[in-house]
Amino acid sequence: MRPHGTRFLSLTAVAAAAAITLAACSSSSTSSGTNSASKSPILIGTSLSQTGDFSVDGQAFERGYNLWVQNINKAGGLLGHKVTLKVLNDNSDPATVATNYSQLINVDHAAFVFGPFSTLLTASAAPVAARNHYAFIEGAGGGPLVFSLKLPNLFAVSPVVADQLIPFA
């Protein structure tokens, strides 16, 4: 189990990276002169462990993602569009997480998808996003298994787990 401070830093890194990645979209939200209330919302999807072995971290990620959505919407949204977040429960299960991302992309038509918590779940989710040509911003799947997939769509926002162990060696 990771210390609470490490979990908080990972969550902060995810929120910060997501905000930086999408901030450019929101910077021109008022320049068009249109009312953001009349524009359709942008759906962002994620699969998080609300139950199961990773539930504590999954619930923390959900709070962080929701905080980011609130802050983006207070600032006018993305390109003047309100952001909505759809969170599916993966029960800390790799098969379920893959099914969830297929639903978010192919059924719900999410504009963006954010990664789940853990290397195990990210390794199952990232290939689904790659097959569908989606960028995959992940915040806590930094194990070697994820990077051995060599996916061009995968963007990690926290240090690679192997690199975090070097200072302790």
Image (cartoon, rainbow, N blue to C red):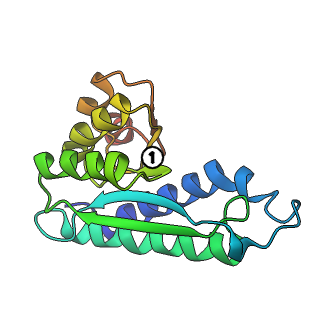
Residue at the spot x=70%, y=73% of the render? Answer: 38
**Disc 1 residue type (three-letter):** Ser
Q: Is residue 30 left or right of residue 54?
A: right
Compared to residue 38, the image places residue 9 above or below, namely above
State the image coordinates of residue 58 (x, y, percent, origin top left). Answer: 28, 66
- Residue nearer the viewer, 18 or 128: 128
Q: Position of residue 145 (x, y in %)?
A: 23, 31
User: For the N terminus, which image quadrant?
Assistant: bottom left
Specify the quadrant that holds the C terminus.
top left
Side of 110 where 145 appears, left or right: left
In the depicted structure, whether residue 7 falls above or below residue 124: below
- Which residue shows up at 45% across the image and 30% down it? 153
SS for dot 1: loop
Relative vertical location of residue 157 with respect to residue 30 in this rendering, above or below: above
Q: Which residue is mark 1?
A: 158
Inspect this view and state whether residue 75 appears: no
Quadrant of the image occupied by residue 136: top left
